[in-house]
Image (spheres, rainbow, N blue to C red):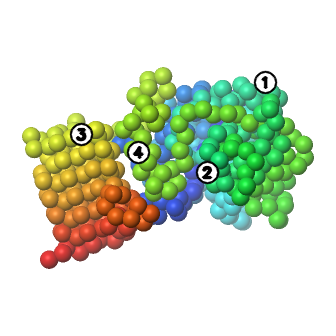
Amino acid sequence: MYRKKECVAMLLAGGQGSRLYVLTKKVAKPAVPFGGKYRIIDFPLSNCVNSGIDTVGVLTQYEPHVLNAYIGSGQTWDLDRLRGGVYVLPPYQKGKTSEWYKGTANAIYQNIQFIDEYDPEYVLILSGDHIYKMNYNKMLQQHKETGADATIAVLDVPLAEASRFGIMNCKPDGTIYEFEEKPKQPKSTLASMGIYIFSWKKLRQYLIDDENNPKSSNDFGKDIIPAMLGNGEKLVSYRFEGYWKDVGTIESLWEANMDLLAPNSSGLNMADDSWKIYGRTTGSPPHFTAKSAVVKHTLLSEGCEIAGEVSESVLFSDVKIAKGAKVEYSILMPGAVVEEGATVRYSIIAENAVIAKDAVVGGSPSDGDVEKWGVAVVAEGVRIGRGATLAAKEMADEDLPDVK
């Protein structure tokens, strides 16, 4: 056994992120680039270390190689510890059998031995696909003060959106008496954020019982939480107030990046030194803007070379925008290239994609039917040929030929 830890965090990072379509064709959702220099997983990892939680298990499964390489030793987040630190935990063979993680609860069940090595009093369960800043220690303190068996972070959402979430119905003191998974007629607007703190001894037994139940789907929201409520365990809500976004869709990922351009109104402020988000740097040189460049209200990262026009956009490292090119309201991921005369509007251009000379990608909502409008997406490494067009809401996961 390692040195005892009061709380161990388990970060569920194995999701495919199918609603991000071509953006997660080669990477897991938590490894998707965000905000000019980060990846989505930087947020929960930074929250952990800022909260004083220094032992984190990262559970990977789908396309794990980019995520594994990115996490490395954990040095970026000060998680390269002698005792504790960050550990990547893929599914592994036990005896003569091996199986993928079947659900969120099963993923934790398969790693009971890892958690037991630290003999924690509490376990923090996190998702690897949300953008937010949160002090988990405050949530832990409430968990201890209330004597809860489980504490669930909740966010007050508009009633019109409540049916998209797992909804917690609570007493005035915050005690949860009912959980509804995406109800058609919600009784409350307190949505589960997928962030849980459990007293470990209690959760450990529920995980074992759940695994032995052949009818279970091995999921926290569908199985563990309802079972605990049904048995009269004490479940308490923890109200979170602040910026939080599930970036599981193309539109929400685009919106969250755009929110960075208006930190005062959106609440997502990356310049706040009191709660830093840490991410790995590329080692690229400083960004360069040529005399012909026009840059307005845009985040630029290291290694960018700008000779064209760019506005209302988020540019990652080593992006190149040629003279005569125009980019607006778009996200250009690392190494993306926009050649001379090309136009990119309301789009997400993935890593190392090329928008060739005079190509047109995306379009404004005001250009046509707003109901049919959407963000255009170009997948990693894809080339949009010379003079080619990719309309609003369209996605390109393979090269488009030159138009002659």
* Dot 1: element: helix
Q: Nearer the viewer, mark 2 or mark 3?
A: 2
Q: Amino acid at mark 1?
A: Glu
Pointer 2 with pointer 1, Cβ within 8 A: no
| Earlier residue among tags 2 and 1 | 1
Locate the C terminus by quadrant.
bottom left
Residue annotated with mark 3: 296
Q: Nearer the viewer, mark 2 or mark 4?
A: 2
Q: Viewer-proximal residue, 316 or 265?
A: 265
* Dot 3: element: strand
Pointer 4 with pointer 3, Cβ within 8 A: no
Q: Kindly identify the residue that appears in the image at 57 percent across and 57 percent down.
A: 15
Q: Nearer the viewer, mark 1 or mark 3?
A: 3
Q: Is residue 366 visible?
A: yes
Q: Is residue 352 visible?
A: no
Task: For marks 2 and 1, give the CA distance.
Answer: 32 Å
| Earlier residue among tags 2 and 3 | 2
Task: For marks 2 and 3, give the CA distance.
Answer: 33 Å
Badge 3: residue crowd in 10 Å (few <14, some 14–19, many ≥20): few
**Numbered badge on residue 257:** 4
Task: For marks 4 and 3, give the CA distance.
Answer: 16 Å
| Earlier residue among tags 2 and 4 | 2
Q: Is residue 162 left or right of residue 369?
A: right
Locate the N terminus by quadrant.
top right
* Dot 4: element: helix
Residue annotated with mark 1: 145
Pointer 2 with pointer 4, Cβ within 8 A: no
Task: For marks 4 and 1, give the CA distance.
Answer: 37 Å
Residue annotated with mark 2: 161
Badge 4: residue crowd in 10 Å (few <14, some 14–19, many ≥20): many
Q: Kindly identify the residue that appears in the image at 60 percent across and 26 percent down.
A: 52
